[in-house]
Amino acid sequence: MIPDSNSVLRNFQKYPIVFELAGSFAMWTDPSTTPCPDSFPIPPYASIKGIFDNISKIRTATTVPIKIEICSPIKKETFTYNSKSPLVNEKKNPKTKNITRTTQIKMNILRNVVYRVYATTYKTMSTFEIEKRFQGINALHALQSIIMRQIKKGQSWGDLFMGQKMFPVNYIGDFREGFKVQEEINMYIPSFPIIHYEQDGTQIISPNSCTIINGVYHYVK
């Protein structure tokens, strides 16, 4: 089921999910920049969706990111790490005689990032199916309450990270003083990930380009 924009925005009025997300480093990989990857300034739809699913998810409803605000200057630096890949030619250490396939990969990552995330909940079953299987349960409100409670308690089903597992989330919670939307940031990204698949195989399509206006990007318009 592809969420209808009007329905999603109406749901946000009833079941808003709002929080601040921050990390010392972040890597939202731009697939068009390999073999030395560069990072998007904001997380793609699938990356934010993955954070929500790691916090909590239920069968009858899902989360839909609506918009994101950049609350820190965009700072990038080069990060180098060792990668063991079967595609790399074997190298033999003359001293230890060990054979390795290690190579160094460089990528441009974001440093000290802070975002404000806005989302809502959306049903994954028809109203008839929900009422038939789960009588008296408001699935949208239930998922919203679970996620906000998990965030407040600092709990999640899996580790939360900023694009890659080596860059964990440092903070997730209420908006903090001292951070504001960077309204001077205006960018156009011609290539942005457009497809995300739900666990049940449902295809979610987001725009194929990204326009950040006054530090804000709308996943749903």
Image: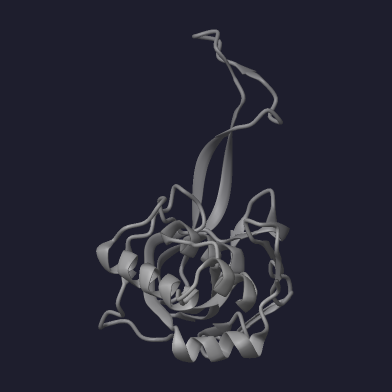
User: Residue at 44% across / 47% down in the picture?
Assistant: 166
Q: Is residue 99 left or right of residue 25?
A: right
Residue 158, image x and y in percent? 42, 50
Q: Quadrant of residue 101?
A: top right
Q: Quadrant of the N terminus?
A: bottom right
Q: Is residue 60 visible?
A: yes
Q: Is residue 183 visible?
A: no
User: Residue at 46% across / 77% down in the picture?
Assistant: 138
Residue 60, image x and y in percent? 55, 67
What colour-coding does the image apply?
Answer: one colour
Q: Quadrant of the C terminus?
A: bottom right
Q: Quadrant of residue 104?
A: top right
Q: Is residue 115 above or below residue 90?
A: below
User: Residue at 71% across / 31% down in the picture?
Assistant: 87
Q: Is residue 141 left or right of residue 64?
A: left
Residue 135, image x and y in percent? 49, 72
Is 99 or 133 nearer to us in this picture?
A: 133
Q: State how many labels appear.
A: 0
User: Residue at 72% across / 59% down in the picture?
Assistant: 32
Q: Is residue 96 above or below residue 135?
A: above
Q: Is residue 124 above or below residue 53?
A: below
Residue 120, image x and y in percent? 50, 79
Is 167 or 175 nearer to us in this picture?
A: 175
